[in-house]
Image (cartoon, rainbow, N blue to C red):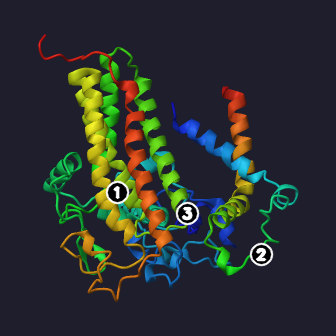
Amino acid sequence: MLTLWNLFEASLLCLNAVCVLHEERFMQKMGWGANNRNQGFEDQSSMKYQVLNLVRSIRTVTRIPLIILNILTIIFKLLLG
Amino acid sequence: MNFNASRNVGQASGPRKAKRVSDVSVMGAPSPVQAFTPPGTFEQGYAQAGPPPPYQQGIQLDPNQDFGSPAPAHLLLDFGYMPGYPQTMPTPANIGSMIQQPIIQDMAMQYGNQLAAQGREAVSRELGRFVPVSRLRYYFAVDTRYVLRKLILIIFPYTHKEWMVKYDQESPVQPRYDVNAPDLYIPSMGYVTYVLLAGFMLGIQHRFSPEQISIQASSALAYIIFEMVLYLMTLYITNTTTALKTLDLLAFSGYKYTTMIASLLAALLLGSMGYYCSLIYCSLALSFFLVKTLRLQLLAGSQGPEQPAYGGYPSNYGNPNPYTDNWAKPSSSGTKRRVYFLLFVAITQPLLSWWLTYHLVPSAPSISPAR
């Protein structure tokens, strides 16, 4: 049953997954690098560009709060099981 | 709030010189009586910007001022039985009798009112930053006739002819005046009714406990959030530009509660056969309703509102439109994406309404009419 707590946990795990994608070791190998691609202005409406943009923005915004949220969730789960 | 209204009240309690604001803040308000400066003078809000009104001269922080010295002219809070300075702090016995004075009660009430007003203003300001309150008010501007017609429309949309929302100078008309406008009243009432009905159905099957209510409520809320996130992500990733706002999407996805409630009621009366029949019928009706309503809003794209073509929507696209100076012809791929998104919405709504109700259905008719 999808409760609010399950939703929170699932979204936390998904955000973690998005944030651990390493820029140098992985993204650039797959051609999804954020810097060295040919970012012509005609490219900006493709879905791949949108997804990669989303990944990069999520990474930038949620890097620090995610640390805090993870620590809180770990403590919470340790204490309450 | 950094403005300490009770700074400078240390006069009567001995030679405490206030040299800095921080000193006084640390000292605090020693006596409750003298803290009640008349709040009518504080019209400037939090930070005292202007010059203090005349009879607040006692509030000025003068480093050279000796607070231990008698200064009756500075304070108008002269209660008659504090004839002159220096006077020790009122003893606890005195405080009781002082508080009984009606003038103190009036001032206390005024001060409390002022604090409450400031607090309310602060809360509404902060809230206004996160939740667009004025937009929300639009969605709740409904009346009984609208709710009735809208519910009938959701269950039986096949005879409705005009699906275009009337506009009133660039902004959509309130739901009260147009049955096609989205509202948030029906979804929120539907949500509450669904939670209560779910509790009732669990109770009939002897599966109820008070925690179930909260589990059902939070589960439905989680599904709402998940669904909204899914739709918004789809719209963002496919780069679809529509005239659909987030709250509109929330309103339209909340209309499935009507479907769910109708199906649950049918399940109560007719058992699982009634549940499935009602679910299929109401899902078809809801999909029809959503397709007709959202088609106009999605496919209009980023163009502004224009004269509605009441001859039906085939005249919106295909024929050269007399109002084409406002018409931004949507690109063909954009239109295709919008159509797919529309189909996506129309399919997930019945699926979700089934998913949220099937575990509540009793296997046999619980309330049989021929007992």
Alpha carbon distance from label 3 to label 2: 20 Å
Label 2 sits on what residue type? Asn
Q: Nearer the viewer, mark 1 or mark 2?
A: 2
**Residue B220 lies in quadrant:** top left
According to the picture, the residue beneath numbered tag 3 turns out to be B238
Q: Residue at x 54, y 65 (%)?
A: B6
Q: From this viewpoint, is residue B116 visible?
A: no
According to the picture, the residue beneath numbered tag 1 turns out to be B105
Label 1 sits on what residue type? Gln
Where is the C terminus of chain B found, in terms of image quarters? top left
Q: Establish if B284 lies above or below B210.
A: below
Of the pair B288 and B317, the residue shown nearer to us: B317
Q: From this viewpoint, is residue B284 visible?
A: yes
Q: Chain of mark 1?
A: B
Q: Chain of mark 2?
A: A
Q: Residue at x 80, y 65 (%)?
A: A33
Q: Residues within 10 Å of mark 3 (few under 14, many from 20)?
A: some
Alpha carbon distance from label 1 to label 2: 74 Å
Q: Chain of mark 3?
A: B
